[in-house]
Image: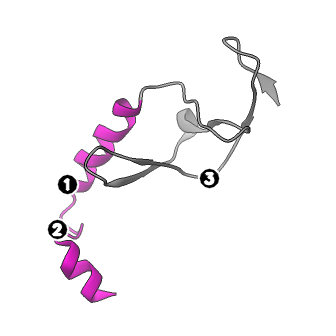
Amino acid sequence: MRESKNCHHRFSMHEENVGFTTNDGVDIFTAGARFQKCITCGHIELPVEHSEMIEPSQIEKRNNLFAPKNMYATLMSL
């Protein structure tokens, strides 16, 4: 455990993915070393802004040829 320099919360490093919901309701899950700092008291405080993490994830998913484009088609295939 280590303490943040900006506050008195204690931080621990987690291996799990971090999930966010954007303004349009799309769930984004991001993993990586720079996103692993999570507060253990129930809320998340990350070293970068939410938009810095979400925008690259959205662009990557939209440019993926194999990503499902239609939610109905995706649900029907399950």
Q: Of the residues shown, which amino acid type is indicated by label 2? A: Lys
The residue that disc 2 covers is 69
Q: Position of residue 49 (x, y in %)?
A: 42, 26
Start-end of magenta stretch: 50-78
Q: Of the residues shown, which amino acid type is indicated by label 3? A: Glu
Q: Secondary structure at mark 3?
A: loop
How far apart are the two marked residues, 3 and 1, measured between alpha carbons? 24 Å
Q: Give the crowd class for mark 2: few <14, some 14-19, many >=20 residues within 10 Å.
A: few
Q: Give the crowd class for mark 1: few <14, some 14-19, many >=20 residues within 10 Å.
A: few
Q: Name which residue lies at 59% across and 36% down.
A: 44
Q: Of the residues shown, which amino acid type is indicated by label 1? A: Arg
Q: Considering only order in the chain, which callout, 3 or 2, is on the residue closer to the N terminus?
A: 3
The residue that disc 3 covers is 16
Q: Quadrant of the N terminus?
A: top right
In the image: residue 5, left or right of residue 57: right
Disc tally is 3
The residue that disc 1 covers is 62
How far apart are the two marked residues, 2 and 3, measured between alpha carbons? 27 Å
Q: Secondary structure at mark 1?
A: helix
Q: Considering only order in the chain, which callout, 1 or 2, is on the residue closer to the N terminus?
A: 1
Q: Position of residue 59 (x, y in %)?
A: 23, 46
Dominant secondary structure, magenta? helix
Q: Is 52 a magenta residue?
A: yes
